[in-house]
Amino acid sequence: MKARSALVYTVLRLLAFLVPFGILMLFPIMQQYYWLAAIFAALIGLSLSMLFLRRPLDEMTAGMAERRARARSRATVSDEEAEDAAAGEVARAEASDDRTAD
């Protein structure tokens, strides 16, 4: 994941909330009911982000998926490798038991 794509998406999402909230707070009724202005701003911000922020969201999620796939490919061990490693440990343990028994 590129840090730039996550930062851009985060800043745009914040702006999608803060700009409508600022505009709504200019109305006298919304100054008294600031919580209502926050709810409306959140709904407007959500709508704007769904409409206009699809590309930054896709870039960010693609980067996250790529990073997760790289981490899984490094951490994943095939069944054959695991069985070979287990068989090798058993063989070494038996060989060391045979040497100590003599």
Image (cartoon, rainbow, N blue to C red):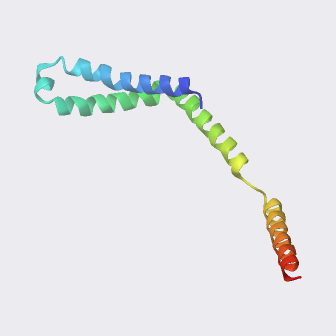
> Residue 100: which quarter of the image?
bottom right
Considering depth in this image, is 92 or 81 the residue closer to the camera?
Answer: 92
Measured along the vertical axis of the image, is residue 21 above or below residue 78? above
Give the image location of residue 94, x and y in percent.
84, 76
Give the image location of residue 85, x and y in percent.
81, 63
Considering depth in this image, is 46 or 7 the residue closer to the camera?
Answer: 7
* Quadrant (top left/top right/bottom left/bottom right) for the N terminus: top right
Measured along the vertical axis of the image, is residue 22 above or below residue 73? above
Residue at image location 61% in from the left, 34% down from the top: 62
Image side of residue 4 versus residue 67, left or right = left
Give the image location of residue 2, x and y in percent.
59, 27
Considering depth in this image, is 29 or 69 the residue closer to the camera?
Answer: 69
Image side of residue 3 versus residue 70, left or right = left
Residue at image location 86% in from the left, 72% down from the top: 91
Which residue is situated farthest in the bottom direction here? 101
> Residue 71: which quarter of the image?
top right
* Quadrant (top left/top right/bottom left/bottom right) for the C terminus: bottom right
Give the image location of residue 95, x and y in percent.
87, 74
Image side of residue 10 versus residue 89, left or right = left
